[in-house]
Amino acid sequence: MAKPLEALVPDLKRAIEFARADAGPVIIRSLVEDGPWWTSNFGASWELSGQPLRPTRERKESPWAEDMPRSKSQPNVVALRLPLNSPLYIGNVAAYAGFAVNNPDAKLRGDTYADHGKKYKLTAVNRNPKWFNVYTAHDENAEIIRDLTKAFVGRGFRSRTV
């Protein structure tokens, strides 16, 4: 039986809340796969929150081999469902997160991540110091848009092909 039109708004709102919640772990999985992996600390420090996240977690050493495979251990991230009028934050709480996402104002031992790449082998995807900017680019082909689409399609929204 068809629902009255008034029922559409709450149903749509609920569906969007669930799809947005599903998107959080999908996005974090991509950030872990694309990001640097000197130790497991940075990858394990991505979190979801209803509040802004601060980079305060100190680095824990983990002796990973230089030729570690791209299929890194993934953190177990639980979807966080919040009302649509509440922000959903995805952030990295590692103390050196600004350095790892190549923020030019964030330096480690005097170097940015790009500077670090001139001396050492970078471990981010494609050895690109701008891996985070590539992931979050503001265009329709950005990887973050693909991850959002994946989560929304998984909740029954149809993907539009151009």
Image (cartoon, grey):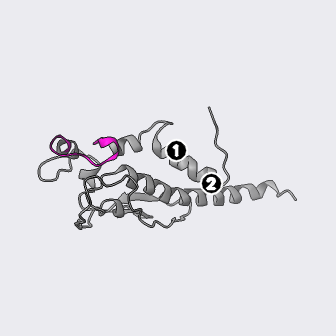
Q: CA distance from mark 1 to mark 2?
A: 12 Å
Q: Nearer the viewer, residue 17 or 43?
A: 43
Give yes or no for residue 121 being in the magenta stretch.
yes
Frontmost residue, 37 versus 129: 37
Element under disc 1:
helix
Task: Indicate whether 132 appears above or below 48.
Answer: above
Q: For the magenta stretch, what is the residue range?
A: 117-129
Q: Residue 144 location in percent, x, y?
A: 47, 46
Quadrant in which residue 59 is drawn: bottom left
Name the outermost residue toward the top: 162
Q: Residue at x 50, y 61 (%)?
A: 86
Looking at the picture, does residue 116 appear above or below residue 82?
A: above
Q: Mark 1: which amino acid?
A: Arg
Query: Is residue 86 or residue 30 the one in the foreground?
Result: 30
Q: Which residue was labeled with disc 1? A: 146
Residue 136, position as x, y percentages in the image: 41, 44
Q: Regarding mark 2 in the picture, which secondary structure is present there?
A: helix
Residue 66 painted magenta: no
For the point 47% across and 36% down, which residue is it? 139
Q: Which residue is mark 2?
A: 154
Disc 2 residue type? Gly
- In this rendering, would 43 be left or right of 158? left
In the rendered image of this protein, does residue 7 appear above or below residue 134? below
Name the residue rendered at 24%, 61% in the picture: 95
Label 2 CA crowd tier, 10 Å (few <14, some 14–19, many 20+)? few
Q: Outermost residue, right direction?
A: 1
